[in-house]
């Protein structure tokens, strides 16, 4: 990628709102009315952070992540969300965001950066493998709402 876009740490209610389109591409099941308060609460109570890349007045890519500790993985940064608008894919934004999160992890001296991805998302998996991620676990869910 010749042009490196600046990564911005999302902090304000306006920035959270500007991130809505890319977030709902990845998480269409979310309640649009609860989006701002949900993200604000996660930021305040769960150490959730969002780094985004803007093109004009809107975010076109973002990574949502948190620093956490588990007995299984130790001290990590867990990437909850990573998405780029379809119109901006292929420009290296996901790679730029992954490298940004890895740099934060190194600066915080954590043990690893961890994420989950859909089994069928081969395009994203190729990007993750290219950036040093490896297949290490099988993520299982018991949906209690059904």
Image (cartoon, helix red, strand yellow):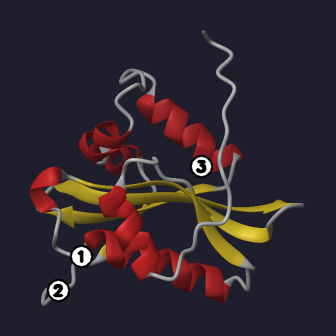
In the image, 81 versus 119, the foreground residue is 119
Helix, strand or loop at mark 1: loop
Q: Quadrant of the C terminus?
A: top right
Rendered image quadrant of residue 135: bottom right
The reply to whether callout 2 and callout 1 are in contact (CB within 8 Å) is yes
Instruction: Identify which residue, 78 or 139, lies in the foreground.
Output: 139
Characterize the local packing of mark 3: few (<14), some (14-19) or many (20 or more) Cα atoms within 10 angstroms: some
Disc 1 from disc 3: Cα separation:
26 Å
Pick whichever of labels 1 and 3 is earlier in the sequence: 3
Label 2 neighbour load within 10 Å: few <14, some 14-19, many 20+: few
Determine the residue positioned at 51% across, 82% down.
Answer: 132
Q: Which residue is mark 2?
A: 1
Q: Position of residue 2 (x, y in %)?
A: 13, 90
Cα gap from disc 2 to disc 3, whole angstroms = 31 Å
In what quadrant of the picture does the N terminus appear? bottom left
**Residue drawn at x 42%, y 51% as measured from the top left:** 12
According to the picture, the residue beneath numbered tag 1 turns out to be 92
Residue nearest the observer in this picture, 134 or 19: 134
Q: Which mark is residue 43?
A: 3
Q: Position of residue 140 (x, y in %)?
A: 67, 39
């Amino acid at each position: 990628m010749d042009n490196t876009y600046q990564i911005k740490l999302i902090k304000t209610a306006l920035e959270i709102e500007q991130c809505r389109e890319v977030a709902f591409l990845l998480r269409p099941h979310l309640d649009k009315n609860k989006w701002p308060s949900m993200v604000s609460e996660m930021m305040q109570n769960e150490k959730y952070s969002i780094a985004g890349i803007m093109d004009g007045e809107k975010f076109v890519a973002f990574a949502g992540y948190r620093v956490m500790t588990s007995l299984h993985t130790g001290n990590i940064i867990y990437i909850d969300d990573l998405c780029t608008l379809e119109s901006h894919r292929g420009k290296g934004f996901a790679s730029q965001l992954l490298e940004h999160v890895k740099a934060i992890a190194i600066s915080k001296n954590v043990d690893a950066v961890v994420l989950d991805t859909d089994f069928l998302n081969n395009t994203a998996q190729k990007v993750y493998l290219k950036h040093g991620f490896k297949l290490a676990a099988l993520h299982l869910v018991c949906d209690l709402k059904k």
